[in-house]
Amino acid sequence: MMPPDEHDDAEAEGLFVPCESLRPETLRAVVEDFVTREGTDYGTREHSLTDKVDDVLRQLRDGRARLSFDPANGSIDVVAANPRDRRRRN
C-alpha cells in the first residue's frame, strides 16, 4: 500500500502509464492529440506539429513528463512529472 501522500497524488493525477507500454503509433497519436488541444501555448515562436510532438516525446522518454490515465472518464493526458518521480527513474 502507498503512503497516504503518494496515494492522494495518484488519485489527483490519475494512473501513471509508462510511455514504453504503448505502441509507437499509439503514443504518437496521444501526443499529437495533446499538442493540438486548444489552449496549448508554445510561446511567441511558431513550431511545427512535428517539432511539438518530438519535444513532448523527448520529455516523456527522459522523465520530465508522463502519461496520466483517468479511469473515471477514460482519458489520457500528458502531465509534468513530479520531481520525486524523476529521481526514482534515475
Image (cartoon, rainbow, N blue to C red):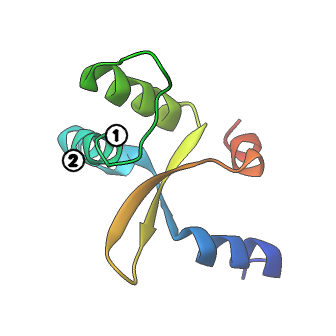
Left/right of residue 10 with respect to residue 75 in the rendered view: right
Image quarter (top left, top right, bottom left or bottom right) of the C terminus: top right
Residue at the farthest front position = 44
Eyeballing the image, is 46 above or below 63?
A: above
Q: In this view, does 3 lie to the left or right of 22?
A: right
Percent across and percent down for residue 39 are 41, 47
Q: Quadrant of residue 24?
A: top left
User: How far across and down, in percent of the image, does residue 29 sit?
Assistant: 21, 44
User: What residue would you read off at disc 1?
Assistant: 35
- With respect to residue 40, does 47 lie above or below? above
Residue nearest the viewer, comparing 38 with 82: 38
The residue to which callout 2 is attached is 26
Residue placed most toward the observer, 42 or 33: 42
| Depth order, front residue of 1/19 | 19
Query: Which callout, 2 or 1, points at the residue further toward the start of the chain?
Result: 2
Quarter occupied by the N terminus: bottom right
The residue under the point 58% across, 68% down is: 13
Q: Do the residues labelled 2 and 1 touch (CB within 8 Å)?
A: no
**SS under mark 2:** helix
Circle nearer the viewer, 2 or 1: 1
- Residue 10: image tag: none
Left or right of 88 in this view: 29: left
Task: Check disc 1 and report its element: helix, strand or loop.
Answer: helix
Q: What residue type is disc 1 on?
A: Val
Residue located 34% across and 19% down the image? 51
The quarter of the displayed image where residue 83 is located: top right
Q: How many numbered discs, if any?
A: 2
